[in-house]
Image: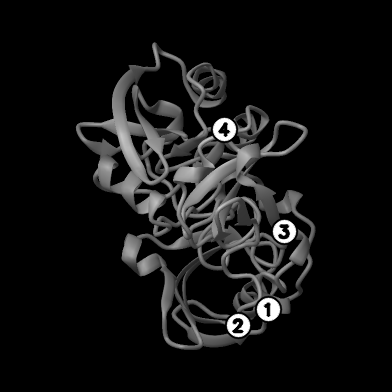
Amino acid sequence: MRIAVTYEDGLVFQHFGKTKEFKIYEVDGNEIENCELITTDGEGHEALAPLLSEYDIDVVICGGLGEGAKNALAEEGIHVISGATGDANQAVKDFLSGNLTSEGVNCDHHKDGGCGSDEGCSCGSDDGCGCGSDEGCGGCGGGCGGCMDPKSRPIIFEGPNAGKVVSVHYTGTLDDGTKFDSSYDRNEPLQFVCGTGMMIAGFDKAVVEMTVGETKEIHLLPEEAYGERDPKAILKVEQSEIPGSEKLSIGDHIVLSNSYGQRFPVVVSEKDDTMITFDANHELAGKALNFKIELVSIED
């Protein structure tokens, strides 16, 4: 697997569309075998996707990401982990250990889809909350509040905040108290268009009724969050069909390709002498979730 990280002075560069360098990591199993730096040669935003494809990149780790860049990377079959900060090497290690959370589309200023703003990014999502997945941060369900006109979004959940751009801080925990995500840890609130289905249903329904400064605690059943686990998402194959699978261990995160060439993340769940089993379910599927939400601001 080949991982590209937006890079500057040893750190994860925070704006995908404006990065001048990528650090490329060659990974075998969970071990980093080789690294190299490449320059973008003035390319930016969506144009970076074909550049990365030329380097056979499987996964991109970055800070801020816009809708257009996300779509361009998806077309090239490149899996994205956004919202990463700090040391680039550590970000890759965290991804390989399953401890890196993706925020999906999280650009809240840049209007053309790439995350090129000088003002920073908050958090949105691809399709859901990702705690170690590509589907967004705790509570996200798709899209980015500040990267689009809120009036263009249909209202799904009615309430005082429906159709408005809201900023919230939150902490998400499981019923056993385990914290799976928190905007406080990133020191940056989550921003989205409320009531329009950009978040998981239970999260969106809670925020649509809140007032600025209010803190609310909610408990969500799986059907209000990421649904039940799908047995069809469990893939059991012979190791001989996947070169290099003999080096994988249970718990390893890798990216597979389907018959259409589309790539998707999986976790090794079982393995014996001849067979290996991959789980493509969302990490939080089938789990009840708890959120403590603080409404920071509302923009009409």
Residue 222, numbered circle: 1
* Mark 1 or 4, closer to the camera: 1
- In the rendered structure, which amino acid carries the disc numbered 1? Pro
What residue is at 56 percent from the left and 58 percent from the top? Answer: 272
Q: For this rendering, which residue is in front, 256 or 139?
A: 256
Earlier along the polypeptide chain: callout 1 or callout 3?
A: 1
Q: Could you say which is closer to the camera, residue 51 or residue 33?
A: 33
Label whose residue precedes the other's in the sequence (1 or 4): 4
Q: Nearer the viewer, mark 1 or mark 3?
A: 3
Say which quarter of the image contains residue 74. top right
Q: CA distance from mark 2 to mark 1?
A: 5 Å
Name the side, left or right, on which 29 lies relative to 36: right
Q: Which residue is painted at 56% across and 86% down in the image?
A: 218
Q: Disc 2 versus disc 3: distance between alpha carbons?
A: 19 Å
Q: CA distance from mark 1 to mark 3?
A: 17 Å
Mark 2 residue type? Ala
Q: Amino acid at mark 3?
A: Ala
Please tell me how crowded label 2 is: few (under 14), some (14-19), or many (20+) other residues with Cα within 10 Å: some
Alpha carbon distance from label 2 to label 4? 32 Å
User: Callout 4: helix, strand or loop?
Assistant: helix
